[in-house]
Amino acid sequence: MSHMHLELDPPPALPEGALRVIPLGGLGEIGRNMTVFEYDGKLLIVDCGVLFPEETQPGVDLILPDFGPIRDRLKDVVGIVLTHGHEDHIGGVPYLLRERGDIPIIGSRLTLAFVEPKLKEHRLKDAPKYTVAEGEVETFGPFELEFIAVNHSIPDALAVAIKTPAGVALHTGDFKMDQLPLDGRITDLRAFARLGEEGVDLFLTDSTNAEVPGFTTSERNITPAIDAVFASSQKRIIVASFASHIYRVQQVIDAAHKHGRKVAYVGRSMVRNMQIARELGYLHVPDGVVVDKIDAAPANKMVLMSTGSQGEPMAALSRMANNSHQQVSLEPGDTVLLASSLIPGNENAIYRVIDGLTKLGANVVHKGNALVHVSGHASAGELLYCYNIVKPTNVLPVHGEIRHLHANAKLATATGVPNVLLAEDGYVIDLVDGHASITGAVDCGYVYVDGSSVGDLTDSELKDRRVLSEEGFISVVLVVDSTNGKVVTGPEIHARGIAEDDSAFDEILPKIVTAIEEAMAEGNHDSRQLQQVVRRVLGSYVGRRLRRRPMILPVVIEA
């Protein structure tokens, strides 16, 4: 676990009648969204997501929010509100429930349906689930929750108004203001305006597209582009998207039906999620269009709906690009459609996949050369619109990297919001008598999931992995006689990941022997200190001669 050392003191005790807000993820990155609300000794959590690792975090599977600040108060948690079913908002739920398994989970029908398989995978059965919908009001502990429909890139997304005697906090979740959504469910701006008239004391707003001017393009606008891809493709079409992007899958199914093609799902999460969406009525599939086998029809009549749009190494599309997928082998003339945006930090991985697909002869269509994806987040014009109808007293930009939060803050200030707060993960915001302020910070950092290990991997160990991958590894073994202070065997040097033969180290061997014997002559017989002598002498030589800084593992054995 890594920790940010914020230049803020721990917060004081929460004043009576005040509301405390602690973001534990999502402020400074796109992912692992989690915000804790505290009132009258009780805690309410909004979202609990994951962040996917970057190339500088080798071996890491997932990154979680840091539960440390609330770990000793889990008994006070009255519920987890999930705004929608994307991984960066629900993926961390099983890990939190492993620490207290009966926390109530609150969300829309589709969101809870996407959470359920995760709980089964982790063998979690005790958490009660409360299905809610837009327009409903529910009470959990001291928190009265009103749920509001918002439009996003997944159906059934909800904003939540959190009402306590301290005031009203309105959390948008992820949202945009598509006026012609594919399912006809628009963001309920009338509810936003009504809450604004009643008074919103703290407005927590999605910042992802705050730098983008104007309004986000409607989902309907990309239908012609997808249709054009289908019309021009002579062989098989592979479409890669998020496994939760039901709207995009619906557009692909509609295009396939129009052009007489069959659709097969590739990837476990894609199969599972689309089955859930179809059973619940969120995905409408004409009879006979979706098939179980990828070769159910000739190549020019098949569409494969795949995961892997972000270049994830183990996802289906990446394995196709590497020619290592067990079922799908790309052929020249196949068309690959990347129907998603680039999540910040994933660009290199995605471009590698595009290069691999192109090398195999595929025609790759992506956002850079065709209008085949639109964002699920509100752009600057939509955010300005919301600030003007809600007219909040205080604003806390959430969900975004630092530049997104700052851009969102400028928009709020431009509309005349009296108090705009810029915070990071771990900052503590108190709403007292209608005024919000940062009152301190809690120790809060990344929690790495590494195989079956959760939270045990440290930044120091990640640094070691990076050194191993970038600089190589050298082991040194020698045996010393502690009675006469002489080296009796070795040193033996073995290098890995270094473009030099072991013989390149022959000239440094006598110097290692001399340094060890001199250290022992001075009465230094501690094996750890002798190992440091070896590391210093060999490290200096390698740095000077080879211009490298490998990991050096010395072993000194006393005979």
Image (cartoon, rainbow, N blue to C red):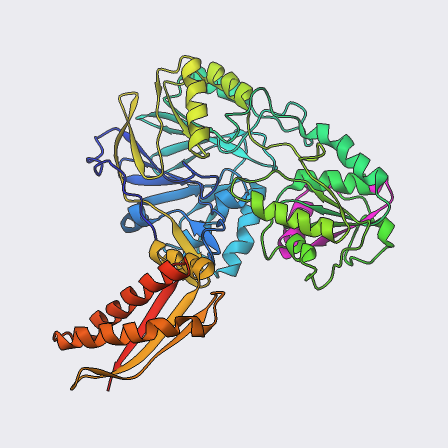
Who's the residue at 62% across and 49% down the image? Answer: 352
x and y, in percent, of residue 549 in the image:
38, 59
Q: Which residues are magenta?
A: 257-284
Task: Pick the residue in front: 536 or 73.
Answer: 536
Does residue 316 appear to the left or right of 168 in the view shown? right
Total marks in image = 0
Q: Is residue 531 above or below residue 379?
A: below
Q: Is residue 11 above or below residue 317?
A: above
Residue 92 colored magenta? no
x and y, in percent, of residue 6 in the image:
27, 39
x and y, in percent, of residue 322 in the image:
67, 58
Does residue 399 appear to the left or right of 508 in the view shown? right
Does residue 293 appear to the left or right of 513 in the view shown? right
Task: Pick the residue in front: 534 or 250.
Answer: 534
Q: Quadrant of residue 25?
A: top left
Residue 274 shows in the view = no
Task: Pick the residue in front: 75 or 66.
Answer: 66
Task: Tell me the quadrant of the picture where the C terminus can be found.
Answer: bottom left
Q: Is residue 287 above or below residue 419?
A: below
Task: Pick the residue in front: 27 or 510.
Answer: 510
Does residue 412 appear to the left or right of 278 in the view shown? left
Residue 270 colored magenta? yes
Who's the residue at 67% across and 35% down the image? Answer: 368
Residue 93 shows in the view = yes
x and y, in percent, of residue 453 in the image:
41, 62
Going by the picture, which residue comes out furthest to the front? 507
Who's the residue at 32% across and 67% down the image? Answer: 538
Going by the picture, which residue comes out furthest to the top? 416
